[in-house]
Structures are given as structure tokens and as C-alpha cells.
């Protein structure tokens, strides 16, 4: 029996054609497998740091894979990059704050999937403007000439709602305040509250949810602050899905999210983890797109994206 | 059907009056759709005597006392009082407990089932089906030789004990000793004026003793005799009377949701009443009929009554009783366990042919 | 030798003596302060006092929340409730107050859930005559909730949130309708 070496095969024209066909068919098989078992990527907006985002939402992503039988992967995304990376098709599912949902909905046709429940308003929260109780500040009008600290620029209940509240009360943040600031780096909402508590600012724009969480954790006391104004409640963090994703897949994910209970677990990083607890979430709720209209109105009045005017 | 039969008319009048007064008692102050509810009354009376700790379910219901003492008066006056018993005494105590378990999971006894239906509460449909099926299964078991033991004349006079106990409770009702509890709030705080309630109880107890009126008995007899069964006509008159007064007093609110003292766990409503129907067929009558029989000297029924009083305490203390929010795990376990016991009894307590 | 006849006579005599003793004991006790002082007879009064103490404790505990609510400080009141909840978790009154604030701030689903939790914990809040009753307020929320949520559900029949809220609305409606529980 004669053994044919690879070199001699290459030398033979027929052999070359045969090898090419074999490689092509192998590639086609791989491609077909990917098509039949695709990987769905979920872009999670970074609240603070990437490791924190993965620690929070890794178990949730694993749960979705386990529950739906589909493969999901978590991708961490910075707020300012979110729209661009979504439009480049880097991920099909999104987990963002409600303002980013509105932006992606208006500009890229993102569809609503489910909204995160946490705290006393469930899937919603409100923006508050607070001052220290001993500051003597009791109304929004008292803030003229004072120092105010906002949360992150794109935060619906840390910036947009309060900006709108001030405008509607006749206080233009750009002109009437001594100055306003946005804390740098991560953990901005906490920095806002501590900045106010330790006298760096006269007033602060705080999400009602953060006030509640920090009160429960004993970091602040209800008696430390006075709430000068509060917005209507608007949706909080939200899952969205690209318009091209198969509706059967969307339904599976929506159902899996709705069925999450505090006892639901998933395998993550070698251990069984409670999904909701890891994600700091109470559950998921199915809001309607019209539930986001109050936020849209706020963004329009504050000339914020996607309704910005220059 | 012999329409000239006096007994038939006595049954019909009793049923009609029970329906009318059952709704009127709610108009006069009893909880909605609970003008008459033997199981609810047992639970509140057990609470009044300190047998459970639900502070909202404590009231010694005078209707309950009236049913027994009215039947006693009737039986005594017309020389029908006979002390009898001796048929599976301990089993009957358990049967009494399980009757209340089934009722508590459904929220109401067979009489309340009809009152709820007459008020438009459509959630009782599965309960009704369960009750009918239960009676049917019970009859089938009896037909296949299930025998709890024969009731005999009782020279010891133990048939006097339950009427005596209820007379003592009547004294308590009027004297109000300090240990007798009464809820200031909640379902048990809602009640018709005491003397009115007692009067209604005495009247219905008296008439029910004369007529043998019984809801499950009506169902049973309709299985056995069809439309010829007087008790069936009594039940029909009961439904008619209750429906008429519900309509006249504006209490007829047909619907499935938001009904007073009702839940929508339909499967468990059905199973609860299945248990009640099944046991009632085996022991010869629904909870109301057991009270009446105990008043006429039947110490077997008296033991069922004692079991029901005990059950009234247990279903509240152990969280078995259902609420408008649904049936608890304890309730589900209790009903299934009860049904298992009945199945076992039906299998093993057979008299060989 | 104790004959049967003599024994029976003695028994009848004993019965008479016992009956007389019973009457005497009851009559004497009724005429003296002994019955009022007995432990067992204080049970109903003890129960009433415990209830009044509970009402007083609740009023004291949640007093600051009520004060904030009267001043229109809904969010501060919610924060105060969160603080109290740390010490008294699962207290029904906190749930009812929370429901009241949530309803005012437009969080209907959450308000209904809070009211339902509170009423399940203690039925006092739907009683007609009870110092803790919030029947009118809960009734109002249920009435408006049944309209808005059922409309939402009709437009989106698969919406699980609306389905869950409807279930709780029906529960509250049932409790408000009365019944024996």
C-alpha cells in the first residue's frame, strides 16, 4: 500500500481541489452550526465598574441561557458608547437606563422587553432635589446662587428629572445657580449624597431609589435631608431588544425574565448564585412604551437626547 | 310526586324559610353571604371559647345554639328524643374535624354554598360540583359495603350530653363569663342582634328536626329517588327563597371576582366540597343536619359536632382556613390528607357480603 | 354492710349536696369581687387592652411618618417608613401607609401590592369600624385601579404585571365586600 504524503497531495492538482472542497465544507458546517445555535449578546450599561456589572448581571445572563436553552453572553458597555456599539450590531439585547432606551427606541427602533423592579416604586423611580435639613433651603427658588450637584449626565432620575424640575420652577441651572457639578468617576450617585452631607454642595439631585437604598443600608437617615421637589415617577432600568431579533426568541426571554423569583438560581463562575440578589433587583415588570412618555416629556423640556437642540 | 304529602310541604317550607332567613341574617348584621354558615359559626364559636387565636374570629354564634336547642325542643315536645349512638365514635370525631377542614378550604358549609350562589357568587360552581360528586362517591362506597357500625339505643343517656353542652353555652352567651371572647373587629364582630339570631336558630332547628332538612341529604335523595325526593324539593325551595330575598334586598351581584369571602382557587374549592360531600354521605348528613341530629339525642352526630368544634379551632390555629387570597399550603395538605383518609376508610371499612 | 338501696340513697344525697354547693359557690362569687379579680375572667379585658396598646404603639411609631405626610413630604415619609421597616419588618401599618403614598405618587401597581400585603397581614384596615380602618381610601384606590388596570390589561392581555395587579385588586375588592374571615 502506498502512503500519500501531504506534499505530494498538494502537488497533485486534483488533490488540491479536493482539499479545498473539504475545507470549504468544514467551514460551511461551522457556519451552519452557528446559524442554528447563535449566540445572543446582551449589552449591559456600566453603572459603576465593569467587574461590578459582570458580577451583577453575569448570573442573570447565565439564567437566561439555562431557562431559554439559547446561548447568551454579557457585554459591558459604557453609557457614552452604547448607541454606537448597538448600532454596529455588537449586541442584540440591551440593558440600560430608561433614557438610553428612549434614545435607542427613537433612533434605532429598539423594542421594550421588561423593566427592572427595585424599591418602593417597582419598575419606576423619581428624581428628587434635596438639601440638608439645617441648610435653611426649603424651596427650589432658594437655590438661586447656590451650589448644586447632579448625578451622571444621562441619568433619568439623577439629572434629567431634576434639570426639568428646576426649569419648570423658573430656575435655569445654566444661569441661576452659583454653579453645578457632576461628580467624576464611578459611584456618582453616592458621591452626590455624600457631597451634600459633608457640605461640599448646598443641594443635590438624587434618585429616590438611591435615597431609599442608602436609608435602608443605614448610610443616611431620613432626617438628614429635606426634599425640595420630586418628579413624577418614571421607568428605571430596562431590557430592550433589537427590532430584527426573532419574535420567538424575544418571547422566550420576556417569559424567563417575568418568571424570575428571589429563589431562582443560575450557575455562574463555578457556583450556584441567586440571580435577583446578585443583580440587586426585586424582579421584572412588563411596562408599556407609553409608560416612558413622562420621561420623553422631561427630556424634551430639558432638551436632552434624543430631543437635544443646539 | 305526591303533592298532598304533608311531609313534603314541611320540607319545602323549612327550605324556603332557611333560604329567606339565611339572607336576612346577613341583612340584619351577619357577614355578607354568611347569614347561615355552620362551619363559619363553628370557627367563630371555637374562637370565643379560646380554641384558636384568630382575634377576628371569636363570637359564640347564637344561631348555632339555636339549631341544636331548637331541634332538642322539637324532639322533646313531640316525643322523638331518643338517646342513641355507638357507631364508630372516634371516627365520627375525625369526620367532624374533616368536615370543617373541607368547609374552611371552600370558605363555607353546604348551606353557605347555596347562599353564596344565590347572591351571584359564581366561584362556588366547582364547590357545587365537588359536593355533588362527593355525595355520589359516598353513596357508591355505602353501596359497596362501607359500614361505620350500627347505631343502637343508648341506655347510658349520652344523647343528652350535646344538648346539655349547648344549653351551658347558651347560659354563657347570656351571662358572658370573662373567659368568653368576642372579637371587636373583623368577620366575627359582624352579627345580627343576639335574640333575633337565637330566635332564627331555634325556629330553623325546630323545623329541621321535624322535616329532616339537609343539603347533602337532598343531593343524596335525588341520586336515589330523583324528583320524588322531598328533600330535593326542600333544597330547591331553599335556593328559591335565598335568591328571592337576595334579589329583593339588592344583594344579588353576579360575578366571578371580588365576591365577599370567596377565592378563585376553583380546584381547591371543588376538592374541599368533595371532602364535605363524601363525608356527609357516609355519616348521614351535612354539618347542619349533624347539629340537628345531635339535638334529638343522636350521640354519634354529637361526636361529629364535637369534632366540628375542635375542627373550628384547628383550621384557624393551623392556618388551614382559606381566605380571599386563596388556599394556603396547610389547607391543601389538609384537604388531600382528608380525602386520603376517606378513601382508606372506603377501602377497608367494608362489611363482607 | 352498705346495701345497694342505702348506697343509692347516699348518691342522691351527694347529688343534692353538690348541686346546692354549686349554686352557693356561683351565687357567692357573683356577689363578691372574687370573680372580677380572677385571672381567667380578665381574658377579654386583657385582649382589649393589648389591642389598644397596639393601636397606641402604631400611632407613636408611625407618628413621624404621619407628620411628614401632613406636610406633603411624601418622599421623606417613604424614607422614614424604610427606616421603621428595618426595626419592624412585616408590620402591616407600614405597608398600608406605603400604599397610600405610592397611590398618591401614581405608582398604582405598587400601591395595590402594598395594600394587599397590609390587609393580608391584618384585616383591620378594611373594617368599617376600627381605629386603624383605611377602608375608604383603599376602596377608592381599588375602584380607580379596577378601571385603569383592566383597561391596560384589555389592551395588553399578555402583560403579566397587569395580570398580577388585577389579581390583587380582586383580592382587595373581595375583602372590602365583607365575608367571614
Image (cartoon, helix red, strand yellow):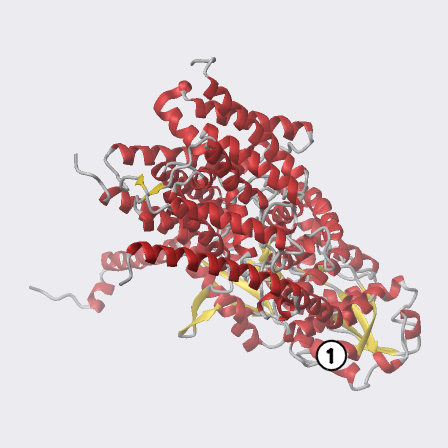
> Would you place residue B29 above or below residue A60 in this image?
above
Which quadrant: the C terminus of chain A? bottom right
Q: Please state if A68 lies on the left or on the right of A86 as rendered.
A: left
Residue B289, image x, y percentages: 45, 37
Point 28% across, 35% down: residue: B142
Residue denoted by label 1:
A221
Q: Quadrant of residue B228?
A: top left
Q: Please state if A63 lies on the left or on the right of B194 as rendered.
A: left
> Would you place residue B25 above or below residue C104 in this image?
above
In this view, which residue lies farthest toward the front?
C1
Q: Residues within 10 Å of mark 1 (few under 14, many from 20)?
A: some
Q: Please state if A171 lies on the left or on the right of B163 as rendered.
A: right
- The answer for which chain carries disc 1 is A
Point 84% across, 64% down: residue: C70
> In this orientation, which residue lies closer to the viewer: C77 or B270?
B270
Residue C8, image x, y percentages: 35, 55
Q: Secondary structure at mark 1?
A: loop
Residue B54, image x, y percentages: 56, 59
Residue B101, image x, y percentages: 44, 49
In this view, which residue lies farthest toward the left?
A1
Q: Is residue A202 visible?
A: no
Point 69% across, 76% down: residue: A215
Q: Quadrant of residue B278?
A: top left
> In this orientation, which residue lies closer to the viewer: B292 or C49?
B292
Which quadrant: the N terminus of chain A? bottom left
Q: Quadrant of residue C95?
A: bottom right
> In this orientation, which residue lies closer to the viewer: A41 or B139?
B139
> Would you place residue B116 above or below residue B49 in this image?
above
Amino acid at each position: 500500500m502506498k502512503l500519500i504524503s501531504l506534499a505530494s497531495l498538494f502537488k497533485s492538482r486534483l488533490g488540491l481541489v479536493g482539499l479545498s472542497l473539504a475545507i470549504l465544507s468544514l467551514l460551511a458546517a461551522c457556519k451552519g452550526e452557528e446559524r442554528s445555535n447563535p449566540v445572543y449578546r446582551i449589552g449591559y450599561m456600566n453603572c459603576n465598574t465593569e467587574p461590578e456589572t459582570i458580577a451583577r448581571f453575569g448570573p442573570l445572563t447565565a439564567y437566561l441561557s439555562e431557562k431559554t436553552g439559547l446561548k447568551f453572553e454579557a457585554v459591558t458597555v459604557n453609557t457614552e458608547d452604547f448607541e454606537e456599539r448597538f448600532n454596529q450590531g455588537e449586541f442584540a439585547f440591551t440593558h440600560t437606563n430608561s433614557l438610553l432606551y428612549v434614545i435607542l427606541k427613537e433612533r434605532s427602533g429598539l423594542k421594550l422587553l421588561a423593566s427592572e423592579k427595585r424599591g418602593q416604586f417597582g419598575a419606576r423611580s423619581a428624581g428628587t432635589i434635596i438639601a440638608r435639613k439645617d441648610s435653611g433651603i426649603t424651596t427650589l427658588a432658594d437655590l438661586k446662587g447656590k451650589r448644586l450637584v447632579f448625578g451622571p449626565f444621562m441619568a433619568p432620575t439623577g439629572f434629567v428629572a431634576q434639570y426639568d424640575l428646576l426649569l419648570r420652577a423658573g430656575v435655569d441651572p445654566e444661569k441661576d445657580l452659583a454653579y453645578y457639578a457632576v461628580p467624576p468617576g464611578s459611584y456618582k450617585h453616592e458621591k452626590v449624597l455624600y457631597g451634600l452631607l459633608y457640605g461640599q454642595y448646598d443641594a443635590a439631585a438624587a434618585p429616590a431609589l438611591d435615597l431609599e437604598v442608602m436609608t435602608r443600608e443605614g448610610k443616611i437617615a431620613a432626617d438628614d435631608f429635606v426634599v425640595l421637589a420630586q418628579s413624577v415617577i418614571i421607568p428605571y432600568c430596562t431590557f430592550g431588544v433589537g427590532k430584527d431579533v426573532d419574535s420567538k426568541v424575544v418571547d422566550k426571554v420576556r417569559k424567563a425574565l417575568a418568571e424570575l423569583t428571589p429563589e431562582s438560581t443560575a450557575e455562574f463562575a463555578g457556583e450556584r448564585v441567586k440571580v435577583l440578589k446578585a443583580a440587586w433587583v426585586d424582579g421584572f415588570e412588563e411596562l408599556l412604551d407609553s409608560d416612558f412618555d413622562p420621561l420623553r416629556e422631561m427630556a424634551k423640556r430639558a432638551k436632552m437626547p434624543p430631543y437635544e437642540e443646539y | 310526586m305526591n303533592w298532598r304529602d304533608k311531609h313534603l310541604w314541611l320540607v319545602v317550607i323549612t327550605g324556603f324559610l332557611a333560604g329567606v332567613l339565611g339572607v336576612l341574617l346577613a341583612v340584619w348584621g351577619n357577614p355578607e353571604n354568611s347569614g347561615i354558615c355552620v362551619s363559619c359559626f363553628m370557627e367563630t364559636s371555637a374562637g370565643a371559647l379560646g380554641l384558636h387565636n384568630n382575634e377576628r374570629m371569636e363570637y359564640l354564634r347564637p344561631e348555632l345554639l339555636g339549631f341544636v336547642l331548637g331541634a332538642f325542643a322539637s324532639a322533646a315536645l313531640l316525643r322523638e328524643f331518643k338517646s342513641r349512638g355507638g357507631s364508630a365514635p372516634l371516627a365520627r370525631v375525625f369526620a367532624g374535624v374533616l368536615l370543617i377542614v373541607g368547609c374552611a378550604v371552600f370558605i363555607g358549609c353546604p348551606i353557605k354554598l347555596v347562599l353564596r350562589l344565590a347572591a351571584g357568587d359564581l366561584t362556588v360552581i366547582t364547590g357545587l360540583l365537588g359536593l355533588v360528586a362527593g355525595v355520589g362517591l359516598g353513596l357508591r362506597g355505602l353501596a359497596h359495603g362501607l359500614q361505620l357500625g350500627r347505631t343502637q339505643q343508648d341506655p347510658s343517656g349520652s344523647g343528652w350530653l350535646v344538648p346539655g353542652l349547648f344549653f351551658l353555652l347558651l347560659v354563657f352567651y347570656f351571662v358572658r363569663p370573662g373567659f368568653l371572647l368576642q372579637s371587636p373587629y373583623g368577620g366575627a364582630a359582624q352579627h345580627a342582634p343576639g335574640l333575633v339570631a337565637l330566635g332564627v336558630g331555634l325556629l330553623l332547628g325546630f323545623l329541621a328536626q321535624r322535616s329532616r332538612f339537609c343539603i347533602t341529604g337532598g343531593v343524596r335523595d335525588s341520586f336515589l329517588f330523583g324528583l320524588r325526593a322531598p328533600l330535593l324539593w326542600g333544597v330547591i325551595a331553599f335556593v328559591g327563597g335565598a335568591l328571592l330575598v337576595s334579589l329583593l334586598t339588592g344583594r344579588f351581584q353576579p360575578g366571578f371576582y371580588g365576591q365577599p369571602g370567596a377565592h378563585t382557587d376553583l380546584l381547591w374549592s371543588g376538592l374541599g366540597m368533595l371532602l364535605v360531600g363524601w363525608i356527609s354521605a357516609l355519616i348521614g348528613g351535612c354539618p347542619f343536619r349533624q347539629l340537628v341530629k345531635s339535638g334529638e339525642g343522636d350521640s354519634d352526630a354529637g361526636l361529629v359536632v364535637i369534632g366540628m368544634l375542635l375542627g373550628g379551632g384547628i383550621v384557624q390555629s393551623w392556618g388551614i382556613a382559606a381566605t380571599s387570597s386563596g388556599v394556603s399550603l396547610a389547607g391543601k395538605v389538609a384537604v388531600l390528607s382528608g380525602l386520603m383518609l376517606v378513601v382508606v376508610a372506603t377501602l377497608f371499612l367494608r362489611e363482607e357480603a | 354492710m352498705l346495701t345497694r338501696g342505702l348506697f343509692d340513697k347516699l348518691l342522691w344525697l351527694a347529688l343534692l349536696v353538690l348541686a346546692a354547693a354549686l349554686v352557693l359557690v356561683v351565687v357567692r362569687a357573683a356577689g363578691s369581687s372574687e370573680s372580677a379579680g380572677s385571672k381567667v375572667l380578665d381574658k377579654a379585658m386583657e385582649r382589649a387592652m393589648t389591642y389598644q396598646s397596639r393601636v397606641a404603639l402604631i400611632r407613636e411609631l408611625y407618628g413621624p411618618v404621619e407628620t411628614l405626610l401632613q406636610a406633603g413630604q411624601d418622599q421623606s415619609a417613604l424614607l422614614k417608613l424604610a427606616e421603621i421597616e428595618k426595626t419592624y419588618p412585616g408590620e402591616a401599618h407600614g405597608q398600608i401607609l406605603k400604599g397610600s403614598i405610592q397611590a398618591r405618587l401614581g405608582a398604582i401597581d405598587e400601591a395595590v401590592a402594598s395594600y394587599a400585603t397590609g390587609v393580608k397581614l391584618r384585616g383591620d384596615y378594611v373594617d368599617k369600624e376600627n381605629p386603624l380602618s383605611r377602608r375608604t381610601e383603599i376602596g377608592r384606590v381599588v375602584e380607580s385601579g379596577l378601571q385603569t388596570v383592566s383597561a391596560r390589561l384589555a389592551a395588553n392581555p399578555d402583560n403579566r404585571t397587569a395580570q398580577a395587579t388585577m389579581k390583587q385588586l380582586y383580592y382587595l375588592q373581595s375583602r372590602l365586600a365583607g365575608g367571614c374571615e
